[in-house]
């Protein structure tokens, strides 16, 4: 248990805090052996609207698949993309602990 931890300074703004942590190691300020995993169930990820051009036949197939699963087609596209991104992440980095 480290006893030579530095005190975390007070920040006036979020930007000031962000700049500080970009140039400082948290291990100098926190006993990371005491860290524990937490969940934030109400945290909503930021989203960004994009424009995506798809062949009409592909979009029709996606809409049919979404209708069969009783979900909006855009939601189904997000589900499929999330699954593929996770597969790629695991293949490149290995499973997240």
Image (cartoon, helix red, strand yellow):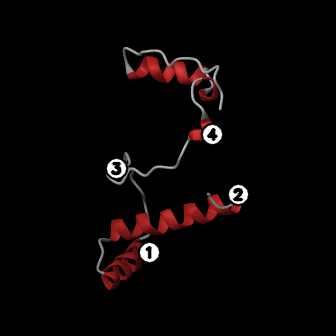
Mark 4 touching mark 3, by CB under 8 A?
Answer: no
Q: Nearer the viewer, mark 4 or mark 2?
A: 4
- Quadrant occupied by the N terminus: top right
Disc ID at residue 92: 2
Please name which of the two marks, 2 or 1, marks the residue nearer to the observer: 2
Closer to the eye: label 4 or 3: 4
Give the vertical position of 24 relative to 57 (above or below).
above
Q: Which of marks 3 and 2 is in front?
A: 3
User: Regarding mark 3 in the picture, which secondary structure is present there?
Assistant: loop
Q: Name the residue under label 3.
A: 44
Residue for badge 4: 33
- Check disc 4 and report its element: helix, strand or loop: helix
Per the model, the C-alpha gap separating discs 2 and 1 is: 28 Å
Looking at marks 3 and 2 on the same chain, the residue that comes earlier in the sequence is marked by 3
The disc at residue 58 is: 1
| Residue depicted at x 37% and y 45% | 46
Which circle's residue, 1 or 3, is located before the other in the chain? 3
Which type of secondary structure does the marked residue at label 1 adopt? helix
């Amino acid at each position: 248990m480290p006893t030579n931890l530095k005190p975390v300074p007070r920040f006036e703004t979020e930007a000031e805090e962000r700049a500080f942590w970009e140039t400082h190691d948290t291990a100098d300020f926190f006993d990371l052996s005491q860290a524990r995993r937490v969940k934030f169930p109400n945290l909503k990820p930021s989203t960004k609207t994009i424009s995506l051009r798809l062949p009409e036949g592909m979009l029709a197939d996606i809409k049919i698949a979404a209708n069969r699963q009783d979900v909006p087609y855009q939601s189904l596209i997000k589900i499929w993309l999330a699954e593929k991104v996770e597969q790629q992440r695991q293949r490149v980095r290995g499973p997240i602990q």
